[in-house]
Image: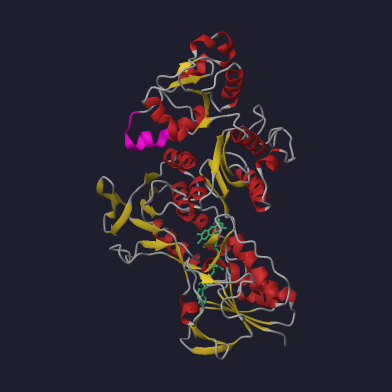
């Protein structure tokens, strides 16, 4: 008999550890304890059972204790909760939830992968009602489905990745869905300017978005929210709570293991806790934010699996590399795909970086190809080094491919010069000869070199309201269909003959549809002696998408005569 490994938690990190250990050591005695009814299920696919994309709940379960025994000789015991770690005896105390019996199991090495539990604040009156759910395991979505089959309206509380996926799936099956979020935006890893595109997409598809709204009570009629305007009732017959997760650290803390500043189990470079025979991975630990240079927490499946593999390797005496995390994620919201990696602009600011960003709307394929669409792309970089800090992309096409390229760059410490020269695949059906990411680097390089002074879409409302001199260089027909109030239309094709109209004594702001033509105009004017011209980053597409949802939600005066969001 080889090493005795006991694993607590039988899903992402736990099962990855057990499987890796089996590959490394055919003789190891491996026991996995899981509190729930199932192991090895796809947490990430749970919302898609609600929308019918995954038709049977059993399809969510990838392996069973029986198949794990047959294929990998793993001793997997479900409905067994570990209630204590007895470090002095090197055993765990286990309660068999079916029989009620308690027993001790010895270990040589112990892996903690207990995950994180959905936050269900006791301060919310009515949180214990039978129509209030959270989404963590297969049993949860089965219960939700049974309930929502009987109701028309559902409130989803929390605009993070899980809340949005749940909201989208419930809308797809015809429910009236209210999405309630305490912050002024959904999806915190995205910047406020980018996320407006997603606010519009949710709104366009009939999800009632309640931002800056904190749930205070749940009752017969629905959910009571506190907003800056006062209290309001959001009608709902069922409520799904998705306001975040709390790492399951109780077992570790009770055993005297170190809990870190970010409230996760503290581990070292090899994923060992403060007891070298006890390892921990996944949502329960805190890990190193490689960009913000601090300890943080990251509830994502890919990192949990990588950590599990590294920990099992270390248990077997193999060298381990722990690069910390940069945080990469993606999701679909109806017709838009969205992805992000590394630091957003606000995260770069919070981390104390000297940084800048560019926002652009290049085409994701050659324009005459079927399915071609703009891809809103934001690149965040350090000033003056040009080191890439992060990126966000939203579009109808393959945003994950673009963001993955940049995630690779971030991981390797790449700069915008590296990204500019990156040689990527090209054929018209797939991308453009200069891909979206190359474009982003080219624009960033111009900004960094001072060749392209810019203002951001978030600054345009103030410019319009103060009567700034804005030149729209789109053609007259485009201008007629919608433009910034007070803007001057001097199409690029007429610019050379109409320079007399452009003042030299006040700042001049240029835009077109996507900033391609306005960049040409900027080059021409700067080359002709204008020293006071700036480009509006993101141009009219960016302005329209940035303004649209707030104009509608707040009922405020638009700064455009009409929007162009397509
Ligand atoms: C709905 C949903 C969608 C998601 N979508 C994505 C996605 O698209 N992309 C992505 O990267 N990540 C996604 N995640 C996050 C990802 O699933 C987690 O980061 C990952 O599963 C964490 O792995 P883990 O092993 O730490 O915890 P888990 O996979 O949650 O496993 C922990 C297990 O430990 C068990 N356990 C806890 N305490 C004990 C105990 N004392 N005794 C026995 N068993 C115990 C729990 O019952 C649980 O089953 C999603 C999560 C959810 C819930």
Residue 529: percent from left, percent from top:
58, 17
- Quadrant of residue 90 in the image? bottom right
The residue nearer to you, when weighing 114 against 128, is 114
Q: Is residue 549 magenta?
A: yes
Write the start and end of the magenta stretch as one range: 547-557
Residue name at image x 56 percent, y 23 percent: 518
In the rendered image, residue 27, in percent from the top left (x then y), is placed at: 74, 83
In the figure, 21 relative to 445: above or below?
below
Front residue (pair 81, 386): 386
Res. 311 in view: yes
Quadrant for residue 200, please give it: top left
Residue 70 higher or lower than 239, as above or below: below
The residue positioned 53% from the left and 40% from the top of the image is: 335
The image position of residue 310, as x and y in percent, is: 67, 69
Observer-nearest of 299 and 528: 528
Closer to the camera in the image, 362 or 453: 453
Total numbered labels = 0
Q: Is residue 222 left or right of residue 109?
A: left
Where does residue 188 sit, x and y in percent of width and height? 46, 50
């Amino acid at each position: 008999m080889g090493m005795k490994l006991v694993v607590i938690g039988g899903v992402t990190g736990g099962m990855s550890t057990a499987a890796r250990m089996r590959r490394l050591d055919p003789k190891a005695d491996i026991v996995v304890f899981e509190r729930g009814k199932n192991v090895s299920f796809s947490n990430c696919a749970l919302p898609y059972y609600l929308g019918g994309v995954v038709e049977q709940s059993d399809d969510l379960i990838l392996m069973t204790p029986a198949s794990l025994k047959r294929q990998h000789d793993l001793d997997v015991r479900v409905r067994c909760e570990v209630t204590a770690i007895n470090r002095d005896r090197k055993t765990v105390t286990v309660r068999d939830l079916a029989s009620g019996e308690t027993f001790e199991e010895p270990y040589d090495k112990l892996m903690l992968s207990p995950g994180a539990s959905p936050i269900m604040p006791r301060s919310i009156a009515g949180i214990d009602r039978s129509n209030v759910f959270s989404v963590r395991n297969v049993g949860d979505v089965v219960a939700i489905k049974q309930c929502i089959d009987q109701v028309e309206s559902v409130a989803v509380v929390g605009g993070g990745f899980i809340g949005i996926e749940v909201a989208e799936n419930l809308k797809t099956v015809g429910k009236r869905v209210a999405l309630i979020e305490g912050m002024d935006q959904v999806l915190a890893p995205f910047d406020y300017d980018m996320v407006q595109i997603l606010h519009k997409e949710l709104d366009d598809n009939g999800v009632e978005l309640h931002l800056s709204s904190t749930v205070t009570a749940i009752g017969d009629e629905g959910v009571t929210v506190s907003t800056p305007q006062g209290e309001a009732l959001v009608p709902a017959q069922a409520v799904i709570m998705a306001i975040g997760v709390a790492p399951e650290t109780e077992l570790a803390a009770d055993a005297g293991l170190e809990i870190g500043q970010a409230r996760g189990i503290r581990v070292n470079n090899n994923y060992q806790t403060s007891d070298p025979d006890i390892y921990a991975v996944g949502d329960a630990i805190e890990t190193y934010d490689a960009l913000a240079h601090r300890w943080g927490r990251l509830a994502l499946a890919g990192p949990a699996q990588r950590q599990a593999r590294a920990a099992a390797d270390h248990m077997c005496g193999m060298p381990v590399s722990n690069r910390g995390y940069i945080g990469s994620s993606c999701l679909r919201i109806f017709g838009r795909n969205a992805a992000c990696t590394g630091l957003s602009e606000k995260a770069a600011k919070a981390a104390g970086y000297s940084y800048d960003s560019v926002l652009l709307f290049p085409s994701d394929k050659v324009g005459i190809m079927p399915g071609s669409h703009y891809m809103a792309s934001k690149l965040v970089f350090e000033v003056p080094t040009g080191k890439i800090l992060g990126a966000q992309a939203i579009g109808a096409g393959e945003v994950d491919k673009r963001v993955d390229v940049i995630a690779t760059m971030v991981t390797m410490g790449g700069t915008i010069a590296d990204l500019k020269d990156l040689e990527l695949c090209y054929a018209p059906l797939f991308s453009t000869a200069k891909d979206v990411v190359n474009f982003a680097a080219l624009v960033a390089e111009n900004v960094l070199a001072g060749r392209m002074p810019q203002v951001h879409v978030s600054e345009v409302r103030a410019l319009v309201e103060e009567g700034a001199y804005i030149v729209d260089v789109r053609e007259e027909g485009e201008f007629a269909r919608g433009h910034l109030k007070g803007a001057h239309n001097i199409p690029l094709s007429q610019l050379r003959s109409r320079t007399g109209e452009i003042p030299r004594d006040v700042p001049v702001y240029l835009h077109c549809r996507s900033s391609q033509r306005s960049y040409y105009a900027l080059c021409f004017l700067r080359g002709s002696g204008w020293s006071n011209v700036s480009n509006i980053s993101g141009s009219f597409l960016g302005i329209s998408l940035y303004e649209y949802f707030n104009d509608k939600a707040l009922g405020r005066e638009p700064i455009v005569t009409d929007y162009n969001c397509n």
